[in-house]
Image (cartoon, rainbow, N blue to C red):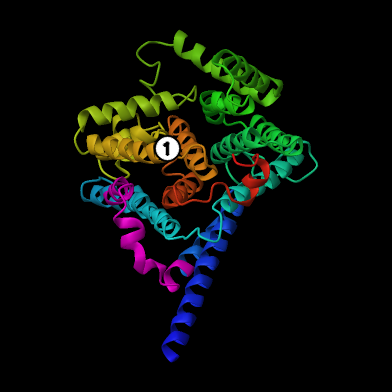
Amino acid sequence: MSISARTAWYRLRRTSSDQWLFFAFVALFFCMPMGTSPPTICAALVTIIWVFSGRVLKIWDTFLKRKWSWPVLLLIMLPWIGLLYTPDVEGLGIKFAEKTHYWIYCAAASSMVFEDSSPQRFIQAFLGGLAINAIIGIMQFMGLFPVMNEISFGLGLGYNTLSGYLILGMLMSSYYFREANERGYRWFFGLLSLLYFIHLIILQGRAGYLTFLFLCPIMAYNLLKGAGIYRICLVSLLLVGSMLLSPVVRDRIALSIDQVKYHLQADPDSAWGREYTVHQDRFYMWRGAGRIFLEHPVLGVGTGGYQMVLKKMGKPQWPAIAHPHNNILYMAVSFGLVGVFAILWFFWEIMKNAFHERETPLGFFILSTTLVMFFGGLVNTYIKDAGTLLLLAVVTGLQNGLGEGDPGGPLLRRIRPEGW
């Protein structure tokens, strides 16, 4: 009898800790779009619950022996190995290496059990927090609410991170729109997509515009519920063209055109990144990264070494730049071909797993997150940015929820037809 009582108490404690961990992750997803401090607090809470609940002791089964964790482990190890040969150990070297702690949240997410709780709660929480932030951002743009960030509209996030979040929100809203069979739900998710879109086009992030350009055909496919390729292309063009309704977008595009004209008319010895200029400094970052990689193709220049090496290559008055604003170039310049292999392996593995489950909410959410991080990472180093790295790490851990039943949870069962 006493053994049964102890067993029952243990099971109750385990169930309770699983639920607390789940609720902590719901809070984390809700707070992600709301600045830096709220998600940091929630992430710390997640870690505390994960450790003291004992779920950390299951890390072998839930994380380490999973095939998708192999490239993650390589991404964790490379920055610490890179400290052995970087020229900037005590500066950016250790700073970048310490960012590997974000993968703790990946391991914590992989330990969750979805028998009684739907992972859709994470998606709903993220969309809810993003909507609140968008409403506040639009009110700030209209002058109805004080601005909290001089370079963005919303609750403190920079426009690069926020743009990625908003595009992810639009992808998920379009997915739910596609799956809805009731007019009310379609209106709701259509308006939610519109809210995110308006917030995106009042931000100055040209990287966000480019990511939207790459991924809007998926949104068009969802909005048209799988129509033909010609209609999808037409709606995609309309979506991209509607961005020009925003004076902010028009100004940023005009700036881009002027910057390209500058390089077309400049001295060939200084144009297109051969020398630093404020006229699109990313050309200088990317060209410098390419030169450094060609000189150190095998192992790169180590963790955080890009800034110091690039500075030595340029003129003294040119600014110091921490990273090349490109995920792949960052891995190439830091860890050589090994780094390029690691980042491509990582994206391939997660995209492959999510693609097989793309018809489910969790599968589409993981796939959409990965696509946003990949395409946005062509012009930003998303794997070093705190906000995007946090989202990517947690979503990577959610791969353990793929294929575990839950055909949609309570929300999708309400918007799908019976027997879908």
Q: Is residue 178 visible?
A: yes
Which quadrant holds residue 186? top right
Residue 262 against residue 11 in the figure, above or below: above
Which residue is tagged 1? 356
Q: In the rendering, at what x and y percent does residue 335 appear?
A: 26, 40
Residue 283 against residue 185 in the figure, above or below: above
Q: For label 1, count other residues whose C-alpha is less than 10 Å away and answer few (under 14), some (14-19) or many (20+).
A: some
In the picture as drawn, the residue positioned furthest to the front comes out as 419
Residue 377 against residue 117 in the figure, above or below: above
Q: In the rendering, at what x and y percent does residue 331 appear?
A: 31, 38
Segment tinted magenta in the rendering: 49-77
Which quadrant holds residue 268? top left
Q: Residue at x 51, y 11 (%)?
A: 261
Q: Does residue 51 show up magenta in the picture? A: yes
- Quadrant of image for the N terminus: bottom left
Q: In the rendering, at what x and y percent does residue 223 appear?
A: 64, 27
Labels in figure, total: 1
Q: Residue at x 49, y 25 (%)?
A: 278
Q: Residue at x 63, y 46 (%)?
A: 413
Position of 324 with respect to 388 (left or right) is: left
